[in-house]
Amino acid sequence: MVVAYCSTLRADQLPASPDQFARDVLRQEVEAQSLDNVLWAFREEKQDDGKRKLLHVYQTKQGQIDRLVELDGHPLTPEQVRAEDRRIQKLISHPGELRQHQKKQREDGEQARKLLRMFPDAFRFEYDGQQGPLIRLKFAPNLKFHPPDHAAQVFHHMNGTMLIDAQQQRLAAIDGVLTSEVKFFGGVFGHLDEGGTFSVRQQEISPRVWEVTAMHVHMKGKALLFKTIAVQEDEIYSDFHTVPVNITPAQAAELLKQDSRDVPQTQAKN
């Protein structure tokens, strides 16, 4: 049974073991994510290929449909709008491609939950005060942890902090930094450079419903055959609202087209 903690706990009221506190919260976090089947429409702002992009996104049971509406702060040109029309029409006309995208998203989500399940064993936790109503924990590698795969090897080279909503037992934020170089198979299969960082933020967007609202990943290194890799992701998600569970990709595409007409014709901000 997971114990509920009040979000206004004083330092002397926290559970004696920060490791157990983290384990309880992360177990609840993984369970809540696994059971989340609500469909959302939202805005996504991201850096991609050196450009700032604003997209409107609709989720459907058949897969996620998005539409680019701004590029570097500017509305799309008529030709760019037509290009988006063609791209989306092609996507919804090929259900197999849409299912492939959905499969990749599900696999990414399961991989993230898999790593989160390992967190309580991979790290040792310490209380680090509070940030507003949130409990702050800092974490460092547990040297007794044996990584079961390549992805988990990163845990032995990472320190960071977590912010926790103790009342709902949800993870509000997690930040990590690579404190040393990560070598895969002694460096034969590549490495990640020291100093790489990641940051994820979650918020309660509806009563007791949490979603990721920001993600920042900045990593550099080498991949197999000495190919330089650079993961630079900056994504912000906002304006969430639910959509009907029976919405079709074609209906989502039409709603995206309607929404795009409502985008203010503003110039890029300086």
Image: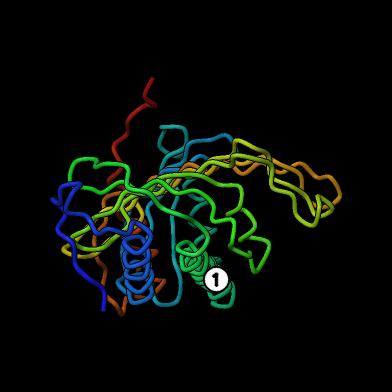
In the image: residue 47, left or right of residue 244: right
The vertical placement of 268 against 126, above or below, is: above
Q: Nearer the viewer, residue 112 or 153?
A: 153
Q: Quadrant of residue 28 in the image?
A: bottom left
Which of the image's four quarters has the C terminus?
A: top left
Q: Position of residue 152 (x, y in %)?
A: 61, 61
Q: Position of residue 16 (x, y in %)?
A: 27, 58
Question: Please, which colouring scheme is shown?
Answer: rainbow
In the image: residue 72, left or right of residue 267: right
- Residue displayed at 51% across by 44% down: 159
In the image: residue 130, left or right of residue 66: left
Query: How many neighbours does mark 1 have within 10 angstroms: few (below 14), some (14-19), or many (20 or more)?
Result: few
Total labels: the figure holds 1
Question: Going by the picture, which residue comes out furthest to the top?
Answer: 270
Which of the image's four quarters has the N terminus?
A: bottom left
Q: Is residue 5 visible?
A: yes
Identify which amino acid the numbered label 1 is placed on.
Glu
Q: Is residue 79 visible?
A: no
Q: Which residue is mark 1?
A: 107
Q: Position of residue 221 (x, y in %)?
A: 71, 42
At mark 1, the secondary structure is helix
Q: Nearer the viewer, residue 161 or 39?
A: 161
- Residue displayed at 36% across by 26% down: 267
- Residue displayed at 54% across by 52% down: 141
Q: Nearer the viewer, residue 37 or 132?
A: 132
The vertical placement of 9 against 253, above or below, is: above
Q: Position of residue 235 (x, y in %)?
A: 44, 45
